[in-house]
Image: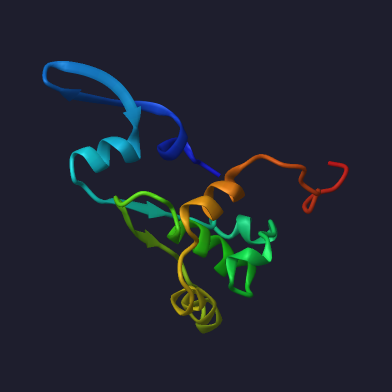
Amino acid sequence: MMPEALVEPWQPYTANGETEDKMLVAAMNLLELNLMTSQPLFQGKLVQLPLPDKMKVFNHGSRHLQYIRSTPSRCVLSTLVGMKDIRHVNYNLEVTKVEPLNREEWFELMKPGKRDIHVEQGA
């Protein structure tokens, strides 16, 4: 829901006396820092939005975690995920049983496309 770190060059980065705006993940990679993501399911709201079977996991929430986990940037190493009950823990652990998406699969899912209305039709 908030891809600015991956798609918008807004982070000032200075090297050799020259400053330019870079994507946050690019600046983090250059500085050899790790980026921690938070609320990858947008406080549970994203679970209602389906992702394709390519994700290799069953649960909708797990599919979104698999997508975040597969972010093609070496600086994204961890994600904070809230879990209210044991079912959520089990669903979230699904992603540990499969390989992350490769770079091409990840970017394919990032492309805009026709989407069905799933929430609040006609609102």
Q: Is residue 41 above or below residue 7?
A: below
**Would residue 1 be visible to someone looking at this image?**
yes
**Would residue 42 be visible to someone looking at this image?**
no
Would residue 47 be found to the left or right of residue 8 on screen?
Answer: right
Q: In which quarter of the image is residue 11?
A: top left
**Residue at x 36%, y 49% (from the top left corner):** 73
**Residue at x 50%, y 83% (from the top left corner):** 86
**Residue at x 38%, y 60% (from the top left corner):** 79
Which x, y percent locates residue 58? 63, 75
Would residue 58 be found to the left or right of residue 82 on screen?
Answer: right
Q: Quadrant of residue 26?
A: top left
In depth, the one of 44 and 56 nearer the eye is 56
Which x, y percent locates residue 105? 55, 55
Which x, y percent locates residue 60? 64, 67
Outermost residue on the right side: it is 122
**Residue at x 46%, y 71% (from the top left corner):** 99
